[in-house]
Amino acid sequence: MTLIKPSVYIETTIPSYLVGRPSRDVIVFAHQELTWTWWTKYRKYFSLYTSEFVLDEIANGDQVISSKRLETLEKVELLDLDDEIRKLAAIYLQKLSIPNSAATDTLHIACAVFHKIDYMLTWNCKHLANASIRRHLQAINHGLGLSTPDLCTPEELLIKEVK
């Protein structure tokens, strides 16, 4: 019997934490370590997806680091984009009170929702992996008849290994 792996949308912060220079900030460094642990030990238990929105964001900045970020996602399946994703993102931008400067965050959510992804993996706890955002997003999606992915950090998605 073949088990279907849960799906995970890899958001921008994940490749950024994976290849970033080790931080002097203890909390950020811990996030980098947890990301590396999840990526090396646990990602095999999931089907990984990302979007052009992520690729566009990680391509910015220092050329050497951006190349490494892009390299981490080379074998991650790219989700198709659809006009419905932008329409859904506009609803989220308005109803979740996410500032226009963070509008791409709503595109990530909309892409994961549209493609019925199980989890969105992120360290963006301000606009994504945030209890208040999750609660409001669930209410919005319930009203729209849509399912909501679990917006979580790598620490929340460490799983017990199946033997």
Image: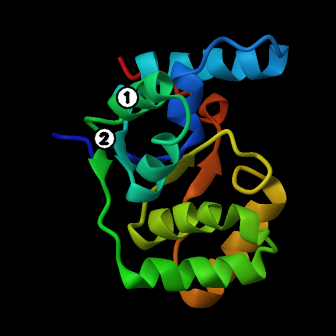
Marking on residue 72:
1
Mark 2–mark 1 CB contact (< 8 Å): yes
Q: Is residue 5 left or right of residue 88?
A: left
Q: Disc 1 marks which amino acid? A: Thr
Residue plotted at (76% across, 22% down): 28
**Crowd around label 2: few <14 · some 14–19 · many ≥20 (10 Å):** some
Residue plotted at (56% across, 36% down): 61
**Disc 2, SS:** loop
Q: Disc 2 marks which amino acid? A: Val
Residue plotted at (34% across, 29% down): 71
Question: Relative to 27, does residue 12 appear above or below in the rendering?
Answer: below
Q: Is residue 13 left or right of residue 80?
A: right
Q: Cα distance, mark 2 to mark 1?
A: 8 Å
Question: Relative to 127, does residue 71 appear above or below in the rendering?
Answer: above
User: Where residue 62 appears, x then y in whole percent?
Assistant: 53, 29
Marking on residue 76:
2
Name the residue furthest left: 1
